Amino acid sequence: MVPESIHEFFAASAGVAGALIGLLFVAAALLSLVRLREVRWSTVRDALFLAGLAVTFVIQLIEGAEVLADPGDSGAVNTIAILVIVCFLIGIARAWELIGGPSFGITEEVTALVRSHGQDAADSGDDSRD
């Protein structure tokens, strides 16, 4: 039975511990990239991704502390929610890349959609003239 007076302390401690463990993994991954001394685009991209992940952890930690200090602060909660959604989308993209899914870009897909829609309109216009 945990007294109510220190319940928030345990919640905050768990959040800080989780963030620090995450930062530890990010730092270890960055150190392994430095140790390999291989400078390729994929290595630079991975390093930038890991640095961005570290920044995300720090922002979440700061915003989480603000939520604990002032639970009525909706701005901090919104920031955390946006970060979670962005990380979720990046995770889906990385997982797609890892399983070897086909590579396609949003601009190519939108261009193809617009062209097919334009061609369908032109084809239907030709039929009405017959």
Image (spheres, rainbow, N blue to C red):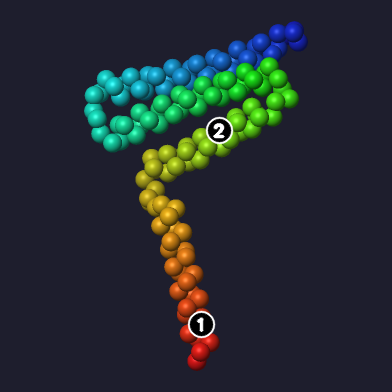
The residue shown at (46%, 19%) is 23
**Identity of the residue furthest to the right in this view:** 4
Residue linked to disc 2: 83
Sequence-first disc among 1 and 2: 2
**Image-quadrant location for residue 66:** top right
Horizontally, residue 29 falls left or right of residue 23, namely left
Nearer-the-camera pick, 79 or 36 = 79
Measured along the vertical axis of the image, is residue 41 above or below residue 76?
below
Residue 35: horizontal and vertical position, in percent?
A: 27, 20
Nearer-the-camera pick, 16 or 3 = 16
Residue linked to disc 1: 125
Element under label 1? helix
Residue 30: horizontal and vertical position, in percent?
A: 35, 22
The amino acid beneath tag 2 is Leu
Element under label 2? helix
Nearer-the-camera pick, 72 or 4 = 72
The amino acid beneath tag 1 is Gly
**Image-quadrant location for residue 70:** top right
